[in-house]
Image: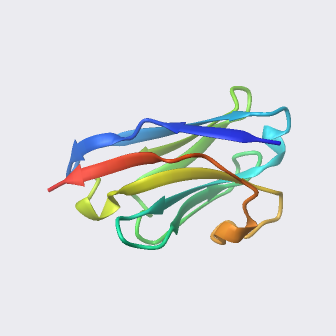
């Protein structure tokens, strides 16, 4: 069982940076691959970034590649999403999620555990 709690969202201007954090509970955290998803207003949830259990491998949606960085600290049971050069189209509720090893990170149905989400709003 893994419980996830996101934090770090807020209202920023275009071009600003923001770092989201996801605190995980559970002794098996380091065995899970982790992902960040987002749900823009009026749209479906979409994949943002994924990271494997060790942190050695990452994968990004084309829309955020080069601007966002996912990382994790297994000693602290934390996952992060550093977001730079934010755009108004990045406005969404952001969720972190945990998937078993070997999952396809972009498929939300492969994730077992989800946080409650944190709102990010980027003004133009």
Residue at the spot 42% in from the left edge and 39% down from the top edge: 19
**Residue 17 locus on image (x, y percent):** 31, 43
* The C terminus, quarter of image: bottom left
**Residue 10 locus on image (x, y percent):** 32, 40
Residue at the spot 29% in from the left edge and 50% down from the top edge: 121
* The N terminus, quarter of image: top right
Occupied quadrant, residue 54 = top right
Give the number of marks: 0
Report the residue that reaches farthest toward the top. 76
Q: Is residue 10 left or right of residue 45?
A: left
**Residue 114 locus on image (x, y percent):** 65, 51
| 98 vs 59, nearest the viewer | 98
Please, which colouring scheme is shown? rainbow
Answer yes or no: is residue 93 visible: yes
| 80 vs 66, nearest the viewer | 80
Q: Is residue 121 left or right of residue 70?
A: left
Answer yes or no: is residue 84 visible: no
Q: Is residue 18 above or below residue 92?
A: above
Q: Is residue 86 left or right of residue 64?
A: left
Residue at the spot 39% in from the left edge and 40% down from the top edge: 9
Residue at the spot 33% in from the left edge and 60% down from the top edge: 90
| 63 vs 123, nearest the viewer | 123
**Residue 84 locus on image (x, y percent):** 34, 48
Q: Is residue 107 above or below residue 64?
A: below
């Amino acid at each position: 069982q893994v419980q996830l709690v996101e934090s770090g969202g807020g209202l920023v201007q275009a071009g600003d940076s923001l770092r989201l954090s996801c605190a995980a509970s559970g002794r098996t955290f380091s065995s899970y691959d982790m992902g960040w998803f987002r749900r823009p207003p009026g749209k479906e949830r979409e994949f943002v970034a994924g990271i494997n259990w060790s942190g050695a491998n990452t994968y990004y949606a084309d829309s955020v590649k080069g601007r966002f960085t996912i990382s994790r600290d297994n000693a602290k049971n934390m996952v992060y999403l550093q977001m730079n050069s934010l755009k108004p189209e990045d406005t969404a509720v952001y969720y972190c999620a945990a998937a078993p090893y070997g999952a396809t990170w972009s498929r939300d149905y492969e994730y077992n555990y989800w946080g409650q989400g944190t709102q990010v709003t980027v003004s133009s």
